[in-house]
Image (tube, rainbow, N blue to C red):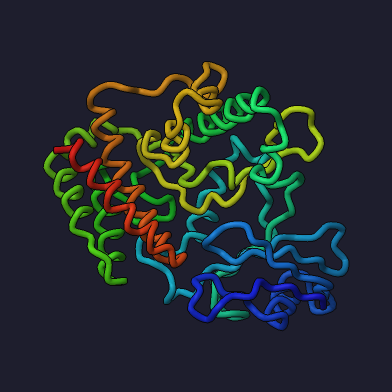
């Protein structure tokens, strides 16, 4: 088998599996006579380890995604692949854009990690293609992003919190639990979480503002340009695929990462996200603005964890300044 893993140090968060383990996975899914001809690790994503695998007897390559070893996972990010799998029956509104699951295995009988095989999406990653278009063409891309986000947020669920659980009766309970988990993860790696605990206390004190959200809506959790595929030859940006929806949860659509990113650079082509034929205008009422600051603090806490995981010490330091600004706005 032609095997092309990405070389990383032993301390790196993402770790490759072996060629023998990939063969064992292919035997489990496609039969004892199947053989992986090639497995190329893709540099996409910063959580799961992903390979494009060519298997005998299959017309097209497949995508193998392997979760981190259980002991490497933060409590705020535990079993994300299982959460994505549990989300699929709720995401039929964007099913034509999503890869199909060929097989998923949580048993750890083949390897000691969760893994999933999915169909290969057509197109190229948006970060590799979007820059080739003139800026005048890019609003159409963000308008499509808004339409996709709107379709996801229109789905209603049975509880608040991650799709696969734990579940919460109120939105404030889900938000506070998430903030506490992130703070506990920061404690576990030796980073100061006092600022995030201040935010948690404010969320608890003003929980009625959070509980104005009474309907659990589907949040994609991580939908933005890095998780989108574009047509390789279309004269204007055309989204052909959406992937890696493993951070889905039920809650307030305004808490979604997608909304945060769409608001990040006003006065640019991103403004098309909010067009009537995209997402529509955001809620800017006083209570919505207050909630958005709680959500921003939660995002910054998660960013702090990710930057630590990537060894970005300067980036970690910046999150303390960013969160200080949010706290000043909340108090």
**Image: 320 above or below 205:** below
Residue shown at the point (31%, 65%) measured from the top left? 185
Image quarter of residue 329:
top left
> In the image, is 17 to the left or to the right of 282?
right
Near-viewer residue (103 or 244) = 244
| Rendering coords of residue 295 (x, y %) | 31, 41
Q: In this view of the protein, can residue 103 be seen by the observer? A: no
Residue shown at the point (76%, 46%) measured from the top left? 122
> In the image, is 47 to the left or to the right of 318?
right
**Image: 39 above or below 173:** below
Q: In this view of the protein, can residue 133 be seen by the observer? A: yes
**Image: 208 above or below 6:** above
| Rendering coords of residue 44 (x, y %) | 62, 57
Residue shown at the point (43%, 73%) measured from the top left? 72
Q: Quadrant of the N terminus?
A: bottom right
Image quarter of residue 58:
bottom right
| Rendering coords of residue 184 (x, y %) | 26, 64
Near-viewer residue (106 or 66) = 66
> In the image, is 275 to the left or to the right of 213?
right
Q: Residue furthest top?
A: 276
Near-viewer residue (72 or 62) = 72
Residue shown at the point (34%, 56%) measured from the top left? 166
């Amino acid at each position: 088998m032609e095997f092309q893993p990405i070389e990383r140090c032993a301390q790196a968060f993402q770790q490759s599996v072996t060629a023998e383990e990939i063969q064992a996975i292919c035997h489990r899914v496609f039969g004892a006579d199947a053989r992986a001809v090639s497995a190329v690790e893709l540099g996409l994503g910063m959580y799961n380890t992903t390979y494009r695998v060519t298997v005998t007897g299959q017309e097209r390559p497949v995508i193998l995604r392997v979760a981190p070893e259980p002991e490497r996972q933060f409590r705020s990010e535990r079993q994300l692949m299982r959460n994505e799998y549990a989300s699929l029956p709720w995401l039929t509104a964007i099913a034509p854009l999503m890869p199909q699951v060929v097989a998923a295995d949580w048993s750890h009988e083949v390897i000691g990690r969760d893994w999933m095989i999915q169909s290969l999406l057509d197109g190229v990653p948006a970060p590799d293609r979007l820059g080739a278009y003139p800026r005048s063409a890019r609003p159409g891309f963000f308008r499509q992003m808004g339409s996709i986000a709107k379709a996801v947020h229109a789905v209603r669920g049975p509880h608040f919190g991650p799709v696969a659980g734990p579940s919460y009766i109120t939105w404030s309970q889900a938000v506070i639990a998430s903030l506490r988990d992130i703070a506990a993860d920061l404690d576990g790696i030796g980073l100061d979480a006092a600022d995030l605990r201040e935010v948690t206390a404010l969320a608890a004190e003003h929980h009625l503002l959070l509980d104005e959200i009474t309907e659990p809506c589907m949040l994609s959790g991580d939908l933005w340009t890095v998780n989108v595929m574009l047509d390789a030859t279309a004269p204007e940006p055309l989204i052909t695929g959406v992937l890696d929806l493993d951070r889905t949860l039920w809650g307030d659509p305004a808490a979604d990462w997608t909304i945060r990113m769409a608001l990040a650079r006003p006065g640019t082509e991103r403004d098309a996200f909010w067009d009537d034929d995209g997402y529509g205008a955001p809620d800017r009422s006083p209570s919505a603005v207050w909630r958005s600051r709680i959500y921003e603090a939660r995002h910054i806490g998660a960013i702090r964890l990710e930057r630590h995981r990537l060894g970005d010490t300067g980036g970690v330091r910046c999150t303390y300044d960013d969160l200080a600004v949010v706290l000043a706005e909340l108090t």
